[in-house]
Image (tube, rainbow, N blue to C red):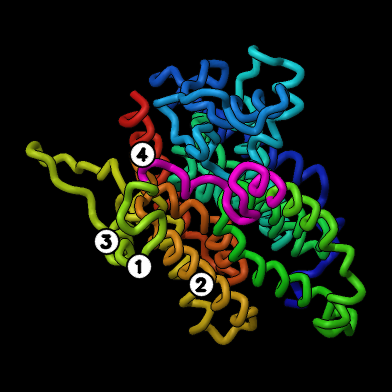
Amino acid sequence: MKELFKPLSAFGQKTIVRDCLTVCFCMLAAYMVVWIFSGQWPWVDNNYNSYVLQTRAWLSGSLDLGRDYPHLELAIRDGKYYVSFPPFPSIVYLPFVAIFKGYFHDGFISLAFAFIGGIYCVKTLHYFGIKGTKSVLWTVAVTLSSNLLFVCVTPWVWFVAQNMAFALSMMAIYYALSGKGGWSLFFWACAVGCRPFQVLYLPIILYILYSGMSQEGMTFWDMIKKRIWWCIGALMVAGVYMWLNYARFGSIAEFGHNYLPEFTRSEYGQFHISYLAQNLWSLIRLPEVGEHGELVFQEYDGTNMFIVSPIFIVWLVYSIAAFVREEKCDKLLIAGILVIAAAELVFIALHKTMGGSHFGNRYTNDILPLAFLGILLAHPKSHRLLYPVMVFGLALNIGGALSYYC
């Protein structure tokens, strides 16, 4: 890990700004293709605006929504209706809803977080010494040539949380590599408030932080004692989550999903081992062949994750190559990333559904930051595998988003 911890000043700020702007323009161009044909512009009213409704309720002094919205997934407790998803996006919305009130369009927040995710991919690539065109292409491969594109073009409640989780997870990884543990743990805690299984990123973040501290001769326990203040921001965020959960549902660990009618009426509830086999199959099942020879991608519970996000293929190939090559790299961390990502997929597969109606396999977007870090740690010497993967993934995901939203 020693080679990872080098001064950021080694990478010119002008180059970073140029690459970040290029990436943002690429992302905007791809999104505009979808918006032009689907009409899902950032300023269009969002019917699936659970987080906006929740924020308005908070600002009016109420934790519940006051009434039912039948088209939304709402938790029902004691005759009251609550947003059933983790609360962090509503915390982000607070100042905007307070200022713009009924004129607030959350599509702009969704777009901003998509850009933030792309920018921190670029910053992480620069940290590993990959700059210029290659940094732009790698960022396109992970943000636009993957199923992440599908969830970034609209602010629907199911999608905006994943969009934010990707950006915040990339920020947590970047600041861990930079040795800024306070910011890293803070953004990690924010990501957990979007997608709870991002909690599994913690061992990776702590390992990276410890590797940086070990350069100064610190043991792990020295780091815990001398850097305990790193936890302050994360604990404050966790405290807000726990207070909201307890105030609404009587449990610091319950954010509302267990009170959804589809789970309260289910024999086995929200999570159960009986869901595992079918949902793991959903991760790798191939699209079906239509009567005219076209491929039909399953709309419910997802389709093959390696087809809709071929960056995962690159990750596995480079990770295997890292163990075969004699060149030095942190093989323990590369292996740890594979284990944590596999564990997250297993936990996801214990859920009753794998995402409901969507294109691709959007739950697998949760491990994209880990896959991206795994690729960079493997120190790819050749970038040839990137190009066909990037072109195929970009075309497929733009086409898939158009077929769904149109």
Kindly indicate the quadrant of the structure image that contains residue 370. bottom right
Could you say where residue 271 lies in the image, as x and y percent from the top left?
Answer: 41, 59
- Dot 4 corresponds to which residue? 358
Q: Is residue 257 magenta?
A: yes
Going by the numbered disc 4, the residue's amino acid type is His
* C-alpha separation, residue under disc 1 versus residue under disc 3: 10 Å
Determine whether label 3 and label 2 are within 8 Å by CB.
no
Q: Secondary structure at mark 2?
A: helix
From the viewer's perspective, is 78 left or right of 377? left
* C-alpha separation, residue under disc 4 versus residue under disc 3: 18 Å
- Tell me which numbered mark, 1 or 2, is placed earlier along the sequence: 1
Q: Is residue 248 magenta?
A: yes
Quadrant of the drawing holding the C terminus? top left
Above or below, 390 against 316 in this view is: above
| Pick the front one: 20 or 280 | 280
From the viewer's perspective, is 247 left or right of 45? right
- Tell me which numbered mark, 4 or 3, is placed earlier along the sequence: 3
- Tell me which numbered mark, 1 or 3, is placed earlier along the sequence: 1
- Dot 3 corresponds to which residue? 278
Disc 4 crowd, CA 10 A, few/some/many (<14, 14-19, 20+): many
Determine whether label 4 and label 1 are within 8 Å by CB.
no
The residue depicted at 80 percent of the width and 62 percent of the height is 178
Going by the numbered disc 1, the residue's amino acid type is Ile
Could you say where residue 172 lies in the image, as x and y percent from the top left?
Answer: 71, 56
- Dot 2 corresponds to which residue? 338
- Highlighted magenta segment, given as a residue range: 242-262
Q: Is residue 118 visible?
A: no
